[in-house]
Image (cartoon, rainbow, N blue to C red):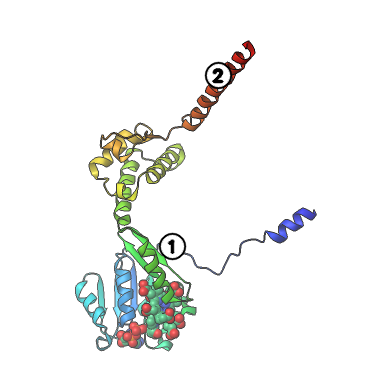
Amino acid sequence: MGDSACASATLAPPSIGGGSLLIAWQLKDKNVLIVGGGEVASQRIESILTTDSRITLLAPAKGLHARTKELIDMHPARITYYDRRFSGPAEIHKMDMVLTALDDVNRSREICEMCRTNKVPVNAADIPDLCDFYFGAQIRDGPLQIMISTNGNGPRMAALMKQKINSALSGNEGQAIERVGVLRGQLKERASGVGGALGRKRMKWMSEVCNVWGIDELVQLDDALITKLLDDGWDKGCVPTLDQLKGRQTRKPARQTAPSPDSSQWLLAAASFALGAVCATLALVSRRR
Ligand SMILES: C[C@@]1(CC(=O)O)c2cc3[nH]c(cc4nc(cc5[nH]c(cc(n2)[C@H]1CCC(=O)O)[C@@](C)(CC(=O)O)[C@@H]5CCC(=O)O)C(CC(=O)O)=C4CCC(=O)O)c(CCC(=O)O)c3CC(=O)O
Ligand SMILES: NC(=O)C1=CN([C@@H]2O[C@H](COP(=O)(O)OP(=O)(O)OC[C@H]3O[C@@H](n4cnc5c(N)ncnc54)[C@H](O)[C@@H]3O)[C@@H](O)[C@H]2O)C=CC1
């Protein structure tokens, strides 16, 4: 009783709450409304362009930032631009997301309220309290997407954290992940089906490949090597190394994924047997003497 009271006093539960959900929102073919055409709007447009959604942009031409103009000209099929101000609730109908970046906080607030009434997710660059979600500093390298958020505390700090994280990356991660994506797709075709024992086996094998192969090795995984890795690895229940796939000599054996006796256990057993034999011989010799 005393012990458990002591334990509960020292082991306080970790604090939860006060954070936000970090998710990779799929916006492909969805409708996004951006209101405002200044510098912040231009950054929003660039972020949203990566998602393959349809952008509607409302902003008077005379207030357009040079980058916003450039993006409108570069992507006429992706951005529908209207040279006018936001007119009212009809603008947000059929929208899946609304972003405001205005120099008019009252209008921004009104748009947020309209969105809330219509249950459309909204971000207002100048009113964090009314945002359904925040933007963050981003690192993008192909399929690799890293978002850094300070949850509204210090946006500039998020930009600085991005520099730190960037300097820890080699620049090959995106390509390595792209190759893993191709391998994974082909594995799912070769061993199709969702869940069950096959799903578990597939996940275990994929995890093992990612654990064993280095980033610089995964980058070399071209289409021919992917087929070979599936033939010599998946089909045979092991994970060969890059050297083995390329037919080069290597001291490392292929990692078995099927349950097999652990080599370290074998080694231990062999060593204890040898030790036992030596002791027995010594005992015998000393007794004879
Ligand atoms: C809440 C949030 C809402 C949202 O925008 O979604 C928001 C709000 C506000 N930002 C303001 C100011 C600045 N914002 C930046 C920069 C960025 N701001 C971003 C996000 C966010 N900004 C969301 C929270 C994200 C988080 O906390 O992690 C980044 C990360 C991403 C992006 O914008 O896409 C991008 C860096 C990207 C990069 O460089 O990679 C800089 C620095 C700079 O420009 O270099 C400054 C000046 C210095 C400073 O204030 O730190 C002000 C005016 C404050 C005032 O008037 O004093 C408000 C409004 C307010 O706070 O009231
Ligand atoms: N979240 C963030 O990261 C940051 C947010 N901000 C805030 O974002 C806001 C926008 O910043 P900037 O782009 O630098 O401002 P800006 O003054 O360059 O641009 C404002 C734009 O809004 C347009 N606009 C104004 N009323 C409109 C209406 N009713 N309908 C359509 N368009 C309208 C203007 O024509 C202009 O294009 C500011 O409130 C600023 O405080 C500023 C820096 C960073």
Residue 167 lies, in percent from the top left, at: 35, 64
Circle 1 crowding by C-alpha within 10 Å: few under 14, some 14–19, many from 20: few
Q: Residue at x 32, y 79 (%)?
A: 41
Q: Position of residue 49 (x, y in %)?
A: 29, 68
Q: Amino acid at mark 1?
A: Ile
In the image, residue 9 lies at what x, y percent? 72, 61
* Residue 277: mark: 2
Identify the image quadrant of residue 193. top left
Q: Quadrant of residue 84?
A: bottom left
Q: Nearer the viewer, residue 266 or 240?
A: 266
Picture quadrant of ligand 2: bottom left
- Where is residue 10? Give x, y as percent: 70, 60
Q: Residue furthest right?
A: 1
* Residue 168 visible within the image: yes
Binning the other alpha carbons within 10 Å of mark 2 as few (below 14), some (14 to 19) or many (20 upward) gives few
> Is residue 123 visible to us here?
no
Does residue 106 appear to the left or right of 171 in the view shown?
Answer: right
Label ID, residue 23:
1
Q: Amino acid at mark 2?
A: Ala
